[in-house]
Every structure is written in structure tokens, then in C-alpha cells.
């Protein structure tokens, strides 16, 4: 199937063509016609499959074809996103695919001044992509009118619940026109029971689209576990950089402090790196991601707040320096590579203390992950049987360890790019990729 068969108007097809895509992804093939019909929809697809274009393209067409029902200069379409990175990314997709339409868009999030956002709202906005906290700030200051919203989209809905946005979401829903008077779309990479309860409250007779098994990671990502002692993770990571020629790896830690410390350690060892997390200013986050995308950095060390908002074309490697304590976050982390059918690699450095996290991940994805033991970095305890120590390392291996450490060095949440379709990987399909704490703050 081609994009030309989906019923999109020439202006949108022209924009899609100019990005180099001809064939829609499965979620786009199924979701776009339903949304064009005006149906409410629950869309579930693993990360990296083109969910954003799956709702952006038909949303723009419905706005173009519908007559404005309100004299308000407030938005006609509202997209709620959990993080500022994702808000920026979705709004860029709106601009990319709406470039031949006379529709205005705005991304809205905290961490930056409100005055530029207020000025844009006064000039009029058709599509508003917003984080819940900052949106409510504008509502409270009477700078935003939501009475004219015709289309509501919840993007990465499961992440919004994880980040504690449920109260803010319910407040926003109460400010919108009745659910029967607007179109409602909910997209997520995973659907928990809580998500289904939320959907039941604001969706009206929804269609349901699921193009991948629930909580399944991308099939194109090769996943490998490297068992290590906790105090040897840093040296092992540096050894991998030095021996495998990694030049673009997205590395995840559990805490902001850990991300900063690891980034400093990489820099000290000659590996260009930056940390990205919720305590960084917006300008610092944009700069770090831009430098990483441009190849100026070999490593970007991020917390899970960035796991849903990073879209990097042809990202080779994702590294879990620490496993997440929420198994679903593992799926979102490794989904930054192997996007839209392209290949990617994900490595997880796992110590004895993380064995329960690993069990939870393998239970969730219904798969036992391959183990790789690094010569010279064999752990004292195995992950499978912690009561049974590994055989003592030989004197030769100990000598190798010392050599690796001496060579290795020291130790130690991003944005942009239109979200899907992506650059063609093969057969004209939108594609991406190969290679490689906690979410909070209502304005992230």
C-alpha cells in the first residue's frame, strides 16, 4: 500500500513525498483511515513504528476540511505529551507534514518563559502540543481558551500516568467540550489496565488498533545482557567504547546524579559526552541532543524522562548502564534504536543487585535475553544462581583486568526531528535506525 491510497489530500501527500516516503507503516495504514472517518481511536504500537504520523496526518486533514465552530482563537486540536522533548518532536512533525497548509502550531512546556507562548496564543493557534502542567498554568492565568478544541490526542498515555499526570489530565478533560462533540485519540506504546480505565472515561465508541504484541520490543533490535560486578561497570563500558569503535551510543542511567557522573567519566577518558535529564535547562537539553545528532558527541547519557522523546535517525546503540526498575521502561529505552524496521543493538550492563529487574523485563517481553561475558570482566556471581560464584579468575585474566582498567579510565534526561514517517530504510518505508530517573516535574 502507498500513502496515495489512504485518502489524504494532495497537500499532505506532497509533504510526505518531500520527506522521501511512499509506504505507510502498519499503524499508519490502520489508524489513518479510521481517524479520517472521524472515529475515536485507541492506537497501540511499539515505539519506533510511526505513531506520530499516524495521528498527525489525518488530524491536519480533518482540521483543513472542517469549518471552525468557535470564534475563539484557542486551539482546534490539542495534543498532550508527557515531556518537553516529545512535545517539541510532535509539533515539528505537525509543521513538517502541514508545511503546505495554512495551519498554525505551537509547542508548550515548562522550563522556559511564558511570554513567547502567550504571544503565540494571541496570534492564534490551530494545533497546540503541550505538557499538562504548563497548559494548566496558562489556563489559570486566563491566557488559554480550550472551548474550541475539536480533536484531542493523548500521546504516550502510559508514560503520562507513570509520571503522575492523571489529575492534570482529568482537569484538562473537564475544560474541553463534551467528548461527544470532539474526536478523541489515545496513542501509547503499551496499554495497562489503568490506561484502559482512562480511555473508557473520555473515548466514545473507539476503534482499536494494535499492530504489535503488548509491551513487545522492536523485533529489529538485537538485545544482549552483559553480566558484571557493580564496581566494574564503568571500566567495562569504557572498554566497549575503546574496543568496538562505538561513535553514537545513547546510555541510560536511573538517576540524574548518575547521568552527570557517568558523562564526566566518559569525558575524562576522551569520549565526547553530555548528560540529559530533568534538571538541565531547556537550552542545555536542546544543545546536547543537537550535538549528539550531529555526531559531535559519541555518548548521550540520559535518564528515563528522555526515553520517550528521543528520535534519532540511524541511532546504532542503546546502552542500559543500569536497568530500569520499571520493566516497561526497558521497552521504551531500547525503542530508541531499531526504529521502523531498521536494525539496532541494545546492551545492558547487569550486576547481581539488578537480577530481579532483569527477571521482570524478561517476563514482560516473554523472552530470555542473550548473555555475553566480557573476557577479563567476568562477575564474581552469576545472574542465574547468585549463591554459586563463578570460578576464580586466572592470573592471566587478572592481569588482563588490570590492563583493561588502566586503558579504560573513569566513571561516572532529548528532542526534535519529525516523528514519523522517518527516512526510508528500505522499500520506501519510513525508517530510522541502527546502533547504540526518574521522570517527574509537572512541566517536563
Image (cartoon, rainbow, N blue to C red):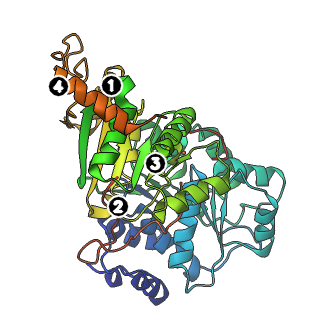
Examine the image and state in which quarter residue 402 appears: top left
User: Is 422 or 435 nearer to us in this picture?
Assistant: 435
Q: Dot 4, how many residues are within 10 Å of its Cα: few (below 14), some (14-19), or many (20+)? A: few
Residue, disc 3: 270
Q: Is residue 324 above or below residue 76?
A: above
Q: Position of residue 275 (x, y in %)?
A: 54, 46
Q: Could you tell me which residue is drawn at 45 percent across and 43 percent down? A: 269
Q: Position of residue 218 (x, y in %)?
A: 28, 52
Placement of 150 over or under 269, stated as above or below = below
Q: In this view, does 116 lie to the left or right of 326?
A: right
Sequence-wise first label, 4 or 1: 1
Q: Is mark 3 on a helix, strand or loop?
A: loop
Q: What is the distance, in whole Å, between disc 4 and disc 1 at their CAs?
A: 23 Å
Q: Does the CB distance between marks 2 and 3 fall below 8 Å?
A: no
Residue at the spot of label 2:
49
Q: Distance between the residues labelled 3 and 1?
A: 25 Å
Q: Are marks 2 and 1 in contact (CB under 8 Å)?
A: no
- Residue, disc 1: 351
Task: Determine contact: label 2, label 4, CB under 8 Å.
Answer: no
Distance between mark 2 and mark 3 Cα atoms: 35 Å
Image quarter of residue 359: top left
Can you give x and y, in whole percent of width and height, for residue 9 in the image?
Answer: 45, 86
Amino acid at each position: 500500500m502507498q500513502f496515495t491510497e489512504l485518502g489524504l489530500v494532495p497537500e499532505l501527500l506532497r509533504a510526505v513525498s518531500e520527506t522521501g516516503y511512499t509506504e505507510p507503516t502498519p499503524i499508519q495504514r490502520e489508524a489513518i483511515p479510521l481517524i479520517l472517518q472521524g472515529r475515536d481511536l485507541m492506537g497501540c504500537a511499539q515505539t519506533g513504528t510511526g505513531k506520530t504520523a499516524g495521528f498527525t496526518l489525518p488530524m491536519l486533514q480533518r482540521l483543513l476540511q472542517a469549518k471552525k465552530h468557535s470564534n475563539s482563537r484557542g486551539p482546534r486540536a490539542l495534543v498532550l505529551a508527557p515531556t518537553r522533548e516529545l512535545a517539541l518532536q510532535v509539533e515539528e512533525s505537525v509543521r513538517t507534514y502541514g508545511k503546505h497548509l495554512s495551519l498554525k502550531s505551537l509547542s508548550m512546556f515548562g522550563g522556559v518563559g511564558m511570554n513567547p507562548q502567550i504571544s503565540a496564543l494571541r496570534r492564534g493557534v490551530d494545533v497546540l502540543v503541550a505538557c499538562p502542567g504548563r497548559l494548566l498554568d496558562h489556563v489559570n492565568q486566563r491566557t488559554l481558551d480550550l472551548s474550541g478544541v475539536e480533536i484531542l490526542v493523548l500521546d504516550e498515555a502510559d508514560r503520562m500516568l507513570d509520571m503522575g499526570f492523571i489529575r492534570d489530565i482529568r482537569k484538562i478533560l473537564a475544560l474541553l467540550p463534551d467528548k461527544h462533540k470532539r474526536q478523541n485519540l489515545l496513542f501509547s506504546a503499551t496499554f495497562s489496565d489503568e490506561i484502559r480505565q482512562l480511555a473508557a472515561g473520555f473515548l466514545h465508541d473507539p476503534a482499536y488498533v494494535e499492530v504489535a504484541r503488548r509491551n513487545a520490543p522492536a523485533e529489529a533490535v538485537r538485545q544482549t545482557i552483559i553480566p558484571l560486578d557493580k564496581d566494574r561497570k564503568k571500566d567495562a563500558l569504557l572498554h566497549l567504547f575503546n574496543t568496538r569503535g562505538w561513535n553514537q551510543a545513547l546510555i541510560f542511567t536511573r538517576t540524574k546524579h548518575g547521568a552527570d557522573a557517568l558523562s564526566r567519566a566518559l569525558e575524562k577518558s576522551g569520549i565526547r559526552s553530555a548528560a540529559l535529564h530533568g534538571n538541565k535547562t531547556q537550552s542545555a537539553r536542546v544543545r546536547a541532543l543537537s550535538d549528539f545528532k550531529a555526531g559531535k558527541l559519541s555518548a548521550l547519557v540520559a535518564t528515563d524522562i528522555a526515553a520517550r522523546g528521543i528520535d534519532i535517525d540511524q541511532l546504532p546503540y542503546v546502552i542500559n548502564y543500569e536497568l530500569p526498575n520499571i520493566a516497561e521502561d526497558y521497552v521504551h529505552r531500547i525503542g530508541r534504536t531499531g526504529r521502523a524496521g531498521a536494525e539496532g543493538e541494545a546492551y545492558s550492563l547487569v550486576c547481581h543487585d539488578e537480577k530481579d529487574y532483569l527477571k521482570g523485563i524478561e517476563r514482560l517481553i516473554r523472552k530470555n535475553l542473550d548473555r555475553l561475558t566480557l573476557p577479563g570482566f567476568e562477575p564474581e556471581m552469576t545472574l542465574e544462581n547468585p549463591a554459586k560464584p563463578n570460578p576464580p579468575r586466572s592470573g592471566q585474566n587478572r592481569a588482563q583486568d588490570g590492563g583493561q582498567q588502566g586503558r579504560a579510565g573513569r566513571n561516572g534526561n532529548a528532542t526534535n526531528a519529525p516523528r514519523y514517517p522517518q527516512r526510508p530504510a528500505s522499500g520506501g518505508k519510513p525508517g530510522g535506525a541502527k546502533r547504540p530517573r526518574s521522570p517527574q516535574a509537572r512541566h517536563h
